[in-house]
Amino acid sequence: MILLTLLWEFGWLSLMAVGGANVVLPELQRIVVAHGWMSAAQLAELFALAQAAPGPNVLVVSLVGWHVAGVGGALVSMLGICLPSSLLSFYVSRWWARHRGGELTVLLSRALLPLTVGLIGASACLLLQAANRGFAGWGLSAAVALLAWKRNWNPLWLLLLGGVAGGLGWL
C-alpha cells in the first residue's frame, strides 16, 4: 500500500515540476509531513544531501522514497517522478516543434519563466524555514547565499562551512 501511495503522490507531483524537481519542494514538504513520513527539517537535510551528490536534483525524491519504504520506495518514487513528466514532455515537444513561433508557444514561453522562478523562490523559503532554528542559522544562510552569488565556489565548500558551524555548536 505504501508503494502505491508513493507512486501516486510522486506521479502527480511530476506533472507540476515545471523547471525541475526543485520547484515542487514546497508541495513535497507538505506531502511528506502530512503523511507523517518525516519532518520538514528531515526533508531539508535530505535535500542538502541530494544536492551534494553528483547527478540531477531529483535525487531527493529517491532519498524520500528510501526513507519511507527502502529500496522499493526509492525505485517507485523515481518512477513516479520521472515517468509522467517524461511522457508529457515527449508529446508537448512534438506539438511545440509543429507550432514553433506561433502565438501560443510565444505566450507560453513568456509565462513559464516567471512561474519557474517563483516556484524556486518558494522552495528556497520553505527550505530556509525548515533548516534555520535561530538567528545564527539565518545569518549563516545569508552568508552562504552571498558567497554563492559573489564567488564561483563548489557548493560542497559551502556545505562544509555549514557543517563546521553546526559541529562547533554555532547553530
Image (spheres, grey):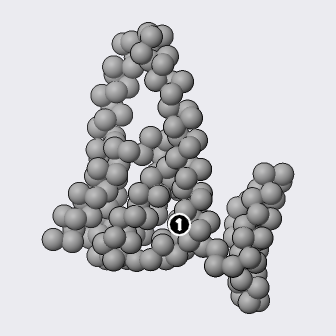
Q: Position of residue 170 (x, y in %)?
A: 76, 85
Looking at the image, which residue is at 75% across and 59% down? Answer: 145
Report the number of numbered marks.
Answer: 1
Left or right of residue 50, residue 167 in this image: right
Q: Residues within 10 Å of mark 1 (few under 14, many from 20)?
A: many
**Quarter holding the N terminus?**
bottom left
Left or right of residue 39, residue 171 in this image: right
Left or right of residue 102, residue 50 in this image: right
Q: Is residue 91 above or below residue 40?
A: above
Q: Nearer the viewer, residue 8 or 74?
A: 8
Looking at the image, which residue is at 71% across and 83% down? Answer: 171
In terms of image quadrants, where is residue 39?
A: bottom left
Q: Is residue 130 above or below residue 10?
A: below
Report whether residue 58 is seen.
Answer: no
Report whether residue 2 is seen.
Answer: yes
Instruction: Spot the residue most to the top.
Output: 102
In terms of image quadrants, where is residue 137?
A: bottom right
Disc 1 element: helix
Q: Position of residue 48 (x, y in %)?
A: 58, 68
Instruction: Spot the residue most to the right.
Output: 150
Residue type highlighted by circle 1: Phe
Left or right of residue 160, residue 101 in this image: left
In terms of image quadrants, where is residue 160?
A: bottom right
Instruction: Spot the residue most to the front.
Output: 135
Q: Nearer the viewer, residue 167 or 26?
A: 26
Q: Which residue is mark 1?
A: 47
Looking at the image, which residue is at 56% across and 49% down? Answer: 120
Looking at the image, which residue is at 72% across and 70% down? Answer: 138
Instruction: Spot the residue most to the left.
Output: 1
Q: Position of residue 101 (x, y in %)?
A: 48, 10
